[in-house]
Image (spheres, grey):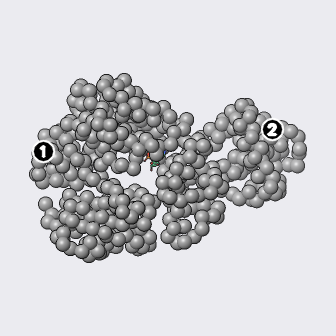
Amino acid sequence: MTQPAFQSSEHPQMVWQKISTILQDIIPPQSYLTWFKPIEALAYDQKTLTLRIPSQFCHDWIESHYHDPLHQAVKDVLGENIVVMYDINPGKPQIISERIAYREKSAPTSDYTSTLSISASYTHLNPRYRFSNFIEGDCNSFARAAALSLAETPGKNPFNPLLIYGGSGLGKTHLMQAIGNRAVELGRVKKVLYVTSEQFTSDFIKGIQDGKKDVFIKNYRNVDLLLLDDVQFFMTKEKTQEEFFHTFNSLHQVGKLLVFSSDRPPNELNGFDKRLVSRLQWGLVAEVQKPEYETRLAILKNLSKENGIDISDDIAHFLSVHISTNIRSLQSALIQLLAQSSLMGREITLDLAREAIKKQHNQPSYTISVDQIQEMVAREMDIPSDLIRSKTRKKEVVRARHIAMYLTTEYTILTQKTIGLHFGGRNHATVIHAVKVVNELIENNVKVREMIAKIRRDIDIALI
Ligand code: ADP
Ligand code: MG
């Protein structure tokens, strides 16, 4: 085991300086300046290092982008088993990185277990992921209800095991972690293990290599709730699948809770043992889908509230309209915006929002053209597409034009002025009017609402 290089009497700032030096070597200079330079060490007592961090979003950014380098640097300087605490609101330190408690208690102190507990430092339950900050929408309400029931209902649960599947960044990990946090809170379970399938695999391999498979088995089969994230990772790994199969059986037989996530439905888990695929579906299979506009808006509002920053309705609308496929991208655009505003002192304006989403290169907003949208709308409404750009004021054509303008606002990042130009040289006021008219139609006219939903699906398919 590494000996701590610092004693508790060391000044926390000196400790942090040493950690910073390591970080500066491994993190690009601009990122270091933005995210780590503002950090101050408040306290160090051989078990815990408390860092003051400027805001919640800095904390989230560091956790999602620099968790491993930071924790490695802390380990290099202070040795193992150090808990890093963050003081975000002065006076209210919040533990965000803790080892899984049961491992600390039950694992013997061999070299192997110490490796496991290091790995466990990034397989912890993250207290940030809760049901209370999980925004419900049509896209996820079924999965959420199943997750909540599993976390809260005592006794045998028909939803056990629960498999949550869906695309990346749609809230699978959040829901799984929320189950863990809630079940612990209610005292329904004592030992929870949240682990990614990658981690499961590497713990398994390490167990075999070190001749300590029994330790591996003990750790994984001695839990009340196992949360295993991203099982698609097992796809080509036969031996790991087999081990997972045994873990599954052993826990399921004694009524322990099991939750899995996958980025695809079970029937698309190619290369999976059939028995395993069948077991994954023994309980309930719930999909999380792409969020609809209202959910995206609510998520943004909630996130900005959590960060103590109010963004205007305009900006929230703009981001929700332009980032439609993935909640993670939505969050990171907002975080960028907040970072720019807080660290660079820039005001949050629509232009800044535009810049932030331009950075989201893989957003579909950039891959569909105005022409394509006009084509799709024209096809759906059975009119020639050039009429949309013409001067015609026929009712049917005006409606198609309005809908195409509306969808162009949603799927591209063009300004209203530029959009107007694509529609036969109309001005920006026409585009604003079109968006208003279509919003009202969506509200009051089922046929239009369904037609727009159909065109959106066509666009989404074209974007894949
Ligand atoms: P996945 O595991 O499906 O890739 P995550 O659970 O990691 O996605 O979600 C990505 C980010 O979006 C996380 O920060 C998560 O908190 C947030 N998020 C996802 N869905 C919601 C939701 N319904 N409400 C609030 N935040 C959400
Ligand atoms: Mg995930």
Most foreground residue, 214 or 340: 340
Is 4 placed above or below 307 here?
below
Is 86 placed above or below 457 here?
below
Image coordinates for residue 382, horizontal then vertical, percent: 78, 35
Label 2 sits on a secondary structure element that is loop
Upstream in sequence: badge 2 or badge 1: 1
Disc 1 packing (10 Å; few <14; some 14–19; many ≥20): some
Residue 361's disc number: none
Most foreground residue, 217 or 224: 224
Tell me the amino acid under the disc marked 1: Lys
Residue 383's disc number: 2
Q: What residue is drawn where x is 52% and y is 55%?
A: 304
Image coordinates for residue 4, horizontal then vertical, percent: 16, 67
Image coordinates for residue 142, horizontal then vertical, percent: 48, 31
Q: What residue is drawn where x is 27% and y is 64%?
A: 49
Q: What residue is drawn where x is 33% and y is 66%?
A: 51
Distance in Å between CA atoms under marks 2 and 1 = 70 Å
- Tell me the residue that label 1 is attached to: 212
Residue 38 visible here: yes
Q: Quadrant of residue 311?
A: bottom right
Tell me the amino acid under the disc marked 2: Ile
Is residue 369 left or right of 396 when viewed as pictured? Answer: left
Q: Quadrant of residue 62?
A: bottom left
